Amino acid sequence: MAKDMTLLWGSGSVPSWRVMIMLEEKQLQGYNQKLISLQKKEHKTQEVLDINPRGQLPAFKCGKHILNESYAACFFLENQYKSQGTKLIPDSPDAQALMYQRLFEAVPLYQKIVEIVLYNYRVPEGERHDSAVQRNKEGLTAELKLWEGYLNKTDCCLAGKEFTLADVVFFPSATFLFRLGLSSERYPALTKYYNSLKDRPSIKATWPPHWQTSPGSDMLKTI
Amino acid sequence: MAKDMTLLWGSGSVPSWRVMIMLEEKQLQGYNQKLISLQKKEHKTQEVLDINPRGQLPAFKCGKHILNESYAACFFLENQYKSQGTKLIPDSPDAQALMYQRLFEAVPLYQKIVEIVLYNYRVPEGERHDSAVQRNKEGLTAELKLWEGYLNKTDCCLAGKEFTLADVVFFPSATFLFRLGLSSERYPALTKYYNSLKDRPSIKATWPPHWQTSPGSDMLKTI
């Protein structure tokens, strides 16, 4: 079945990484894949647009089905391959409720990271304000305070002892934060979470290649 | 079971409305509920913060479980009450894939609406630029073009003939667009979609009260 799947992905694209972790967890190795250069703007080429009209990565085709939104791909794969690989939606109502809540709180977290990282890309020079940058950083700081609190109360994973869909989507964001210079000392619970999962096979196998070979930035070191 | 549920909601809050439609579809009427005034900033009161530390609406408690993110509440309710009320996740892989893809594309759509509606609220006066407002409007126009295309290809609902979770989350945004003055003539597929669902019992029963009695704006009339 993996042979019917095609993934166009970007190195360091958090949504791409989510889908790649998901495919590993569901034992769907062997899919067709192509690394698309975000730097060269290859995500705006016809090859990507044919699958993803938004010109974003990932662009993912699963048989005849198109699932470009990373959450959509994750849910679809979990549903279609329920009994294959890791079971990623827990049965117990307690774990399930917590899993869904964290899974969708990961949306505003990622938005807040992106607002900072892409500020200069999205906002033309004449419209930029230091006060806006500062406000975005404060927004992320408040957001991370919530996550420190959540992670302080859990075992290894976001919804308890088991690795779930919430971790599939959240872990790449957590890693991105540290690559952007987030302080391990100021965020001990996030650091502990990161360390407990970074060597998980699905994660190691799909680590963004250029993150392994090139240094990150210190954009978030004051946060 | 509905008696164990408490929903704090705002009139005209799209995420609140999603959860209310969901509760109707799953025949969970009779839950405890309280209308919170967004205008009076009651969503920042302790009553809301006790359930939703983000100080946002909805704040939703389902027994002992907290599900404040509207998508989390929808997924949890669908999973816990699979055989009660409307089945909102289709079984067929075709409909399911389309449903998940549209469900999660509704996230950037709503973000783009909010960027415009809350611009003056979020951006301090000294940082405002007409060019930013214009760019936000162009972003929404491009987004709506995608949705017109999608809706042109479907039957009544987003994933085909059946009403699904994708409609639960998307319909309130569609209605919000028209309340903000979106042109029915320029968006005929969206208008047809709106008309085909606006009298659905779950939707009619939960229509934001102040949208029935007060006029909307013309903020989006040029889009």
Image: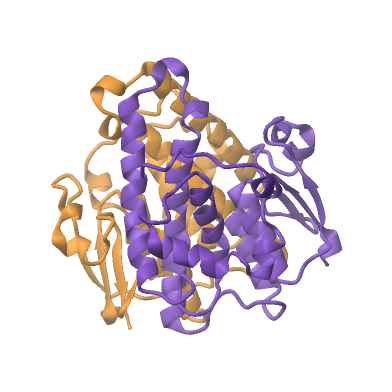
Chain colours: A orange, B purple
Residue under the point 39% across and 75% down:
A27
Residue under the point 47% across and 33% down:
A184
Residue under the point 63% across and 67% down:
B199
- Left or right of B88 in this view: B111: left
Q: Is residue A143 above or below residue B96?
A: above
Asked which quadrant contains residue A123, the reply is top left
- Left or right of A6 in this view: B196: right
Q: Is residue A207 above or below residue B48?
A: below
Asked which quadrant contains residue A219, the reply is top left
- Left or right of B63 in this view: A40: left
Which residue sits furthest top? B126
Asked which quadrant contains residue B64, the reply is bottom right
- Left or right of B199 in this view: A111: left
On the question of residue B179 being in view, the answer is yes
On the question of residue A92 being in view, the answer is no
Q: Position of residue A66 (x, y in %)?
A: 33, 71
Q: Quadrant of the N terminus of chain B?
A: bottom right
Q: Nearer the viewer, residue B208 or B169?
A: B208
For the image, the number of numbered tags is: 0
Q: Position of residue A133 (x, y in %)?
A: 39, 23
Q: Nearer the viewer, residue B18 or A170?
A: B18
Q: Is residue A56 above or below residue B94?
A: above
Q: Position of residue A178 (x, y in %)?
A: 40, 38
Q: Nearer the viewer, residue B83 or B155?
A: B155
Residue under the point 35% across and 55% down:
B186
Q: Quadrant of the C terminus of chain B?
A: top left
Q: Position of residue A16 (x, y in %)?
A: 33, 57
